[in-house]
Amino acid sequence: AQSVTQLDSHVSVSEGTPVLLRCNYSSSYSPSLFWYVQHPNKGLQLLLKYTSAATLVKGINGFEAEFKKSETSFHLTKPSAHMSDAAEYFCVVRRGGGADGLTFGKGTHLIIQP
Amino acid sequence: EPEVTQTPSHQVTQMGQEVILRCVPISNHLYFYWYRQILGQKVEFLVSFYNNEISEKSEIFDDQFSVERPDGSNFTLKIRSTKLEDSAMYFCASSGYTAHSYEQYFGPGTRLTVT
């Protein structure tokens, strides 16, 4: 079985400062890992994915994440927060192939202070 | 850019009634999924569908749920006899093989309210 733990339910940062959203995973297999973002009243948008290629993954809107197998972590970062980054962020793991369902973390609500 | 669409955006129904939630996946995708998100809780996998049959289902997906791809474009989730606890946001997703992986693309969701 696989699972993800998002260590913070809420993160608040000031605009222009770095963002760090933490995620730890558990998987019996070599996992595929994703970060999705959900803006208010919108669907889920894929930010980035890790699929056993490069451990540092770059996504959209300046976000990146680093896969660390020894720490079973996949933290999401951004050097400089923008007001438009305010949203719910989900760390997600998938066990394997195309038909496998995704397992979501509980989400981290990112608040950007002006 | 192609996207997954869902209708209706909001559905209100009475307990015990049947509802059908509709999705149009991205046209060249082969895998289809339903997820739900109860208010304040995490997104949960319900079912995946490939080659006109269920590939995987969670323990949530019991006999009151069914899925169908009635034609070449639509993918539906039917809840036979709705309960209050079925109130949730239901997301449809589809995936195809892109850049050595299967990325799932989500629709905007249908908010189901059971009264």
Image: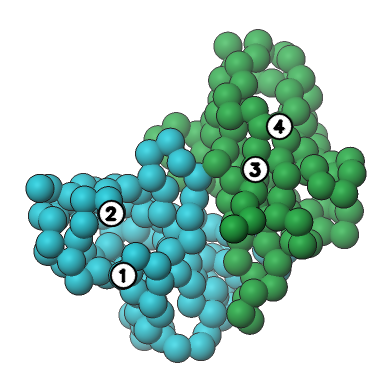
Q: Are marks 2 and 1 in contact (CB under 8 Å)?
A: no
- Mark 4 or mark 1: which is in front? 1
| Residue B35 left/right relative to A57 | right
Where residue A85 is drawn, which disc sits there?
2
- Mark 4 or mark 3: which is in front? 3
* Spatial CA span between label 1 and label 3: 27 Å
Q: Give SS at disc 2.
A: helix
Extreme bottom residue here? A54
The amino acid sitting under disc 1 is Gly
Disc 2 with disc 4 on a shared chain: no
The amino acid sitting under disc 2 is Asp
Q: Chain of mark 2?
A: A
| Residue A32 left/right relative to B19 | left
**Residue identified by numbered label 3:** B5
Q: Colour of chain A?
A: cyan
Seen in the picture, residue B91 relative to B16 is either above or below; the reply is: below
Disc 2 with disc 1 on a shared chain: yes
Which residue is at the front of the view, B103 or B14?
A: B103
Numbered circles on residues, count: 4
**Residue identified by numbered label 1:** A62
Reading the chain from its start, which is encountered first: label 2 or label 1? 1
| Residue B74 left/right relative to A10 | right
**Dot 3, how many residues are within 10 Å of its Cα: few (below 14), some (14-19), or many (20+)?**
many
Q: Chain of mark 1?
A: A
Q: Which quarter of the figure has residue A40?
A: top left
**Residue identified by numbered label 4:** B21
Q: Give SS at disc 3.
A: strand
Disc 1 with disc 3 on a shared chain: no
**Residue A11 drawn at (x, y percent):** 20, 52
* Spatial CA span between label 4 and label 3: 11 Å
Q: Colour of chain B?
A: green
Extreme front residue here? B1
